[in-house]
Image: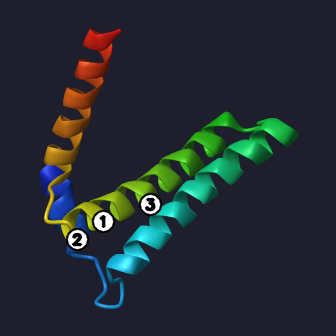
């Protein structure tokens, strides 16, 4: 799936109440859920890796939705964000 197609489709599920502040705050919350999942795995170990991986995938999907929403709120496409990040990383690598 093309990342911009994802963004367009995902924003079709956005509720009117999911305003820009909600999207930004929820992004932090979803990252926190992924971090908590990993912390518990570190503390307790992972007994069922397939289930753990499924949960990681779900949390990453929630993070991706929030990222798409925040980008849209700034009139950015996910492709623009990704390309800008690669440009930044390329510049850093070139600088050593």
Q: Position of residue 6 (x, y in %)?
A: 20, 56
Residue at the (58%, 40%) spot, across then down: 53
| Tag 3 residue | 62
Label for residue 73? Answer: 2
Quarter the C terminus occupies: top left
Is 55 located above or below residue 15 in the figure?
above
- Dividing the picture into quarters, in which one does residue 47 lie? top right
| Tag 1 residue | 70
Q: Which one is earlier in the sequence, the residue at label 3 or at label 2?
A: 3
Q: How far apart are marks 2 and 1 (CA)?
A: 5 Å
- Marks 2,1: beta carbons within 8 A: yes
Q: Position of residue 14 (x, y in %)?
A: 29, 79
Which of the two marks, 3 or 2, is nearer to us in this view?
A: 2
Left or right of 54 on screen, residue 68: left
Label for residue 15? Answer: none
Residue at the (77%, 36%) spot, across then down: 46
Which of the two marks, 3 or 1, is nearer to us in this view?
A: 1
Q: Position of residue 36 (x, y in %)?
A: 70, 53
Q: Where is residue 43 in the image (x, y as percent from the top left)?
A: 85, 40
């Amino acid at each position: 799936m093309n990342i911009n197609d994802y963004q367009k489709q995902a924003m079709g599920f956005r509720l009117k109440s999911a305003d820009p502040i909600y999207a930004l705050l929820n992004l932090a919350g979803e990252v926190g859920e992924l971090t908590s999942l990993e912390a518990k795995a570190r503390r307790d170990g992972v007994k069922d890796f397939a289930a753990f991986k499924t949960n990681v995938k779900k949390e990453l999907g929630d993070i991706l939705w929030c990222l798409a929403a925040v980008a849209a709120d700034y009139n950015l496409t996910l492709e623009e964000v990704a390309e800008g990040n690669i440009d930044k990383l390329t510049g850093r690598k070139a600088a050593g």
